[in-house]
Amino acid sequence: MLRQFELVEKVKDYDPDADEAALNRAYVYTVQKHGAQKRASGDPYFSHPIEVAGLMTDLQLDEQTIITALLHDTVEDTLVTIEDIEANFGPEVARLVDGVTKLSKIEAMPENERAAENLRKFLLAMSEDIRVLLVKLADRLHNMRTLHFIKKPEKRQRIARETMDIYAPLAERVGMYEYMREMQALAFRELEPEAYTTITKRLDHLRNQDGGQVDAIALKIKQALAEAGLTVEVSGREKHPFSIWQKMSERHVSFEQVTDIMAFRVITETEADCYTAMGILHTTWQFLPGRFKDYISTPKNNGYRSLHTSLMYENSMRVEVQIRTREMHQRNEFGLAAHWAYKQHDEADGQVGWLRDLIEIVDASHDAEELLEHTRLAIYQDRIFAFTPKGALFQLPKGSTSVDFAFAVHTDLGLSTVGAKINGRHMPLRTPLNNGDVVEIIKGAAPEPQLSWLGFVVTGKARAAIRRAVRLKERAEVAQIGSKLFDEIATQVPARIGKKAIRGAIDRLGLDGAEDLMHAIGSAKLSDREVMEALVPGCTADMDEDAQWPARDRAISIKGLTPGVGFELAQCCHPVPGDRIVGLRRKGETVLVHTIDCLELINGVDTDWLDLSWGKRSHGAVGRLSVTIYDRPGTLAEMAGVFAQNKTNVTSLSQSEFDDPFVTYEIEAQVQDLSHLARILSALRASDAVAQAERL
Ligand code: MN
């Protein structure tokens, strides 16, 4: 374990201006707070954060990152709060520690809920500052190094699997190849102990057989390059058991067939030397065509730069060679961390240095996809990640609300949503969620999706489900109206209408069933005459065409008036034949006819009320409606089409309200009678363009 002064010395070595007192305080703080807690190894717990801090100094990270590493488990595992950290170490360290703590959330999640890809995205999205991710990776690396101390095999397996699936790919993603390789090596040993042992034994065997081939080849390479006047460093290694195993399983070959088990690295002084060195190697040994890659002129997505080639050594052994400058090497092995560490020393404002680097890499990238890859910290900025109270993770587009979340969990949950708690607090359903929110959906007794939700949901799934549910509900309502109209129509045909007749009518009309028939009647897709004809074929042949009421025709008579007395239909309530009506007698004037529920009647309490009814065959009046449609191209025309299909003349139309995404119109239309008006309303409600339709 690093001692206090050793840690400080390491930091001072590359950053002479680092705040020694702050580093010392953080060291003491973590020792105190973790106190007597123990690791599985039996070591005091604080040895872990101190080792993690040590790993961060190897990457020459700034003092805030080192302090964050020291404190990274205090909030999670001790009584310390983020507020304590802020009071003692300032807001920046507090933010970083908070970030690392939040990343630990996933470790508490139930295993079956954790899709690896989801988690990688989550980790990236949560790591708004790359330093948070670096500390987390170092944390995991150290935990892997001490994995063998954990007694329970299931726990070891779980941690190893998680490392293989999540953390090693993440390390690769940000170019931390050293971390990636070590994590994979340690995880492989745990996950595939047999394969690990077999491959290791084979490697030992080979090594004994040829007595240190690696060093001999490295020397040969170095000599060849020195003869050409190049100063280089050459190192060689056997590939790690995991990468050999990977090749074996990817290419379905046996160990014997994996020929390139040795890899060499040539470090040059300049970029030009890289190409010179490669030319020399290619003329000294036979090289494998198609295996050569130039990542210097075309770096990998994460900024990796190097030349790669494969040579046939002594005609039988295939060896891999990587050629790069020292600076490229540093950056390759430690990715952006190294890139950042290099830069921050020449910049006054190291704080934004890493961000600037990121932008620099983005500028240098070639296409949109690569750019996205580079801005890995920005890549998921259009997404948020939220948890169920049980810890299941859901990924949603930014701006998503509790309703979107509920539908993401399950359509049934979405439909029965009545409220939501975000992080334990009741919040309006339209509240946009934030990264890391815990969302608890409150369910109602019955599904009752609200049309108004369409005004704020952002996911397609929620939108489609709400539309479907609302439409089904409307359909049921329309069918109900249709069923009432049907009873009326049935009385007009010259036969008793039973189930058999209805079935016959459904067949003749090519409909799906009784509900379908009632809906067709309710939404005025069928005229009375068509229904009658379907029930009793031929029964309408001698019927007066008038039964269909040509539009504009008006024939109103009122029963209950003294003969000779004139009447007028009131402009406030616009009674239509079929409404229950009363008349107000006014001295020397006509009788004013109101609907029975008209509010204007209050002003006539002391006048004479006449109990009126409509004369037989009365038809033709003005109906007033309020119709709310979606504000998008074509919806107004679609609404107008509904009126036209119902042979209705619209006499006045004005916009009364605009509430994105809806717009509401007040409409006056000539209707025949109450059932005509009801049918128009049903047809409007059945239209995709219409959100709501009511009589005024
Ligand atoms: Mn830790």
Image (tube, grey):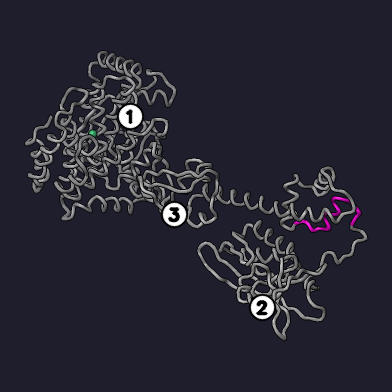
| Cβ atoms at labels 2 and 3 below 8 Å apart | no
Q: Amino acid at mark 2?
A: Thr
Which numbered mark, 1 or 2, is in the foreground of this view?
2
Q: Amino acid at mark 3?
A: Arg
Residue range in magenta is 525-539
Q: Tell me the number on the disc at residue 430.
A: 3
For the residues labelled 1 and 2, the Cα–Cα distance comes to 111 Å
328 lies above or below 621: above
Crowding around mark 1 (Cα neighbors within 10 Å: few <14, some 14 to 19, many 20+) is: many
Does any portion of residue 317 appear in the rendered image?
Answer: no
Q: Residue furthest right?
A: 542
357 lies above or below 622: above
Which numbered mark, 3 or 1, is in the foreground of this view?
3
The secondary element bearing badge 2 is classed as loop
Instruction: From the viewer's side, name the closer residue of 383 and 612.
Output: 612
The secondary element bearing badge 1 is classed as strand
Crowding around mark 2 (Cα neighbors within 10 Å: few <14, some 14 to 19, many 20+) is: few
Query: Which comes before the other along the chain, label 2 or label 3?
Result: 3
| Cβ atoms at labels 1 and 2 below 8 Å apart | no
Q: Which residue is mark 2?
A: 607
Q: Amino acid at mark 1?
A: Leu
Crowding around mark 3 (Cα neighbors within 10 Å: few <14, some 14 to 19, many 20+) is: some
Residue 537 position, x and y percent, is 89, 51
Q: Which residue is mark 1?
A: 311
